Amino acid sequence: MLTVVGSGICRDHLTDRAKKIIERAEVVYGSKKALDNVREFIKGKFKVMKGFSEAEYSEIVEESKRKNVVVVSTGDPMVAGLGTKFHAEVEPGISSVQVALAKLGVDLCDVVVMNAHSKEVNLREIMHFLKFRSVLILANRRFDIKKLGELKVVLLENMCMNERVREGLASEMELSSDYTIIFIRR
Amino acid sequence: MLTVVGSGICRDHLTDRAKKIIERAEVVYGSKKALDNVREFIKGKFKVMKGFSEAEYSEIVEESKRKNVVVVSTGDPMVAGLGTKFHAEVEPGISSVQVALAKLGVDLCDVVVMNAHSKEVNLREIMHFLKFRSVLILANRRFDIKKLGELKVVLLENMCMNERVREGLASEMELSSDYTIIFIRR
């Protein structure tokens, strides 16, 4: 049995449903950060994921045929997370997108969320969505913010860690964190 | 002090952060359904919201100037919820959108979420978004699904209650629940 469980991103974000699933697991996989979030609820073994490669995913799937295995994903497994990497049950968690929208006072139904971690997000697509919606981009420091030019942006960095929120013109900004959310109001 | 807190939509969805905020409140507001979700954590008074009108929101804001007031919103306050009705701190909860995406195996960064509860969602806008993304519509039984014509849809109704998932052509479907999610794959 294999379940992918969201751990949330802030302290005390874990739901009781998620705790119970983790407590019942024989083996719990996750990044070091994800495992740290849930350590007190692990009763079985735990294994730190390193490669996040297809080979590693296949090994986990193999093991789950014999054992009750949980993969912990920080935030929500269905928000640029590990939920789509497996054919498994998924238990939601609070994502960085939710924390950002709560801070910004913006409803999810008024934004388009884009993931710049795993693929190139191009300006044409951003400008296109901005005609209809505000845009929220999940980014790391490799994201070239200069390409947003004279757009006014809000940067939310390291939420629930050493959090920093800045506002200004994209052309005058630098990204300094791999956990950055860029918000562009429509 | 005023905080809007998400209660999640399934049993045991409440986070420890949300529990603590509710426990500290002198007065807790919410729909009957929302209050039922969190009843065991209410230490102060509770008041059932009825009108969801500007007048009711203003009264709550007035009371929060003298007391520690919490408004409980089912799901996440920033997903077609009460989070945008107040200038207040917002504590996220697990939304029906998250539960639906977990069941569908679809990442939030691959969809556009539309709210048909509070406003008309027109076909042109849906077709437009479908060029780039899958579409997830929050709907009630007044939503005219026939207008989606020959589009193939997945209906997820009453999630975490008497749940029902159906798949088929929109033209052959009827909506029977005020808690319906319509998913249209790109």
Image (tube, coloured by chain):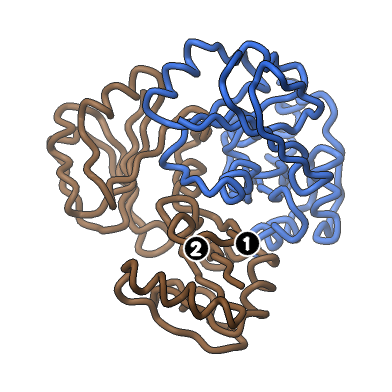
Chain colours: A brown, B blue
How far apart, in angstroms, are the residues tagged by discs 2 and 1? Answer: 9 Å
In the picture, measured across the screen, residue B30 lies left or right of residue A51, that is: right
Front residue of B25/B83: it is B83
Please, which chain is the residue tagged with disc 2 on? A
Please, which chain is the residue tagged with disc 1 on? B
Displayed quadrant of residue A169: top left
In the picture, measured across the screen, residue A186 lies left or right of residue A12, that is: left
* Residue A80 can be seen in this image: yes
Disc 2 to disc 1: CB gap under 8 Å:
yes
**How many numbered marks have been drawn onto this rendered protein structure?**
2
Q: Secondary structure at mark 1?
A: helix
Q: Which residue is mark 2?
A: A10
Q: Vertically, is A35 above or below A153?
A: below
Task: Tell me which residue sits at (63%, 30%) in the image.
Answer: B182
Task: Tell me which residue sits at (36%, 23%) in the image.
Answer: A186
Q: Vertically, is A45 above or below A70?
A: below
Q: Which residue is mark 1?
A: B17
Question: What is the three-letter code of the residue carrying label 2?
Answer: Cys
Q: Secondary structure at mark 2?
A: loop
The spot of residue A83 in percent (x, y) is 49, 57
Question: What is the three-letter code of the residue carrying label 1?
Answer: Arg
Front residue of A148/B109: it is B109
Task: Tell me which residue sits at (71%, 61%) in the image.
Answer: B19
In the picture, measured across the screen, residue B39 lies left or right of residue B116, that is: right
